[in-house]
Image (spheres, helix red, strand yellow):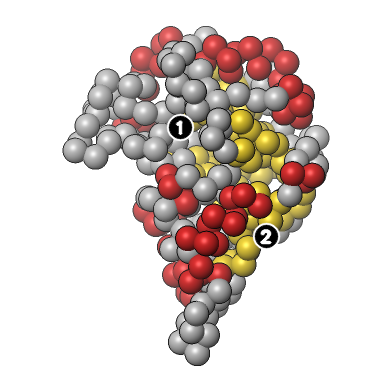
Amino acid sequence: MNKKAVILGCGNSAGVPAIGNDWGKCDPNELRNRRTRCCVAITDGGKNLIIDTGPEFKMQFNSTDLSCPDAVLYTHAHADHIAGIDELRWLAELNKTVIPTYGSRETMDEIVERFNFLFKPSRPDLYVQYLQAHFWEETDYYKQHEVAGFKFTLVPLDHETVTASGFRFGDFAYTTDMARMLPESVEALKGIKTWVVDCAAYKSMNDRVHCTFEKIVEYNKVIGAEQVYLTAMGKGMDYQTILNETPDGYAPAYDGLEIIFDDTVF
């Protein structure tokens, strides 16, 4: 059955432009260079999942016609992926619901500790619970999961300082943030058609926490994705420049990009 992924944000931790209206090498007249922090919506028109809630989450969500998320999945607990979590409070209140949130044990332990008031209000007589935490253990990687009717395979990603979670939804995969992937993770993505992947390092061999384009091309020799979109892009990655430098089948993502995928293929 066809579903849709909407790239709500594809910027790195600073976004583009960075604070101070710093566009770096990016042409400010190219609309696709305006990048908010990484966020994706997975939707079938009736239900939807959100992956990560970065600093611009309210703006990103309000730019869509999505209903209240049926669940939120977290890749990891770095600030650019979770700093907008408090906006879920207002969605939960507006829709009179408790929103389920999912992430690895490491990720959710940190999120619950930092935003305890959303999960376990200290004054239940004054405040209600807005979010419910669900934890994935290490043994849950490489297994198929189902959340709110959406099926996906959970894939571990080496982000140097933490293990991030990647997701394969049928013939579509989303993997940010990462510096590299284990052979087992590459194998788990084999056969997808569309891949959205962290390429914040691009050509920088000195970046130890994000992936280079060279590595992505090598991984895709095994994975075999027909279309690869680069995400987590910073001010040094001009849209048209990257588009011209990459071969057919590779392209920079952009905020608002929509991808139709078949979730029955595993």
Residue 89, compared with residue 36, is above or below; it is below
Give whichever of 155, 161 is nearer the camera: 161
Report x, y in % for residue 125: 50, 90
Q: Residue furthest bottom?
A: 125
| Apparent side of residue 64 relative to residue 19 in the rendered image (left or right) | right
Give whichever of 56, 241 is nearer the camera: 56
Query: Of discs 2 and 1, which sits in the foreground?
Result: 2
* Mark linked to residue 35: none
Helix or strand or loop: what does disc 1 sit on? loop
**At x 76% / y 26%, what residue is drawn?**
184
Q: Which residue carries the number 2 mark?
A: 134
**At x 48% / y 36%, what residue is drawn?**
257
**At x 32% / y 27%, what residue is drawn?**
235
First along the sequence among labels 2 and 1? 2
- Res. 30 visible in picture: yes
**At x 73% / y 49%, what residue is drawn?**
137
Report x, y in % for residue 90: 44, 70
Helix or strand or loop: what does disc 2 sit on? strand
Q: Which residue carries the number 1 mark?
A: 232
Rendering quarter of residue 170? top right
All told, the count of numbered labels is 2
| Apparent side of residue 178 relative to residue 236 in the rendered image (left or right) | right
Rendering quarter of residue 248? top right
| Apparent side of residue 39 relative to residue 30 in the rendered image (left or right) | right
Disc 2 marks which amino acid?
His
Few, some or many residues within 10 Å of mark 2 (<14, 14–19, 20+): some
Report x, y in % for residue 121: 51, 77
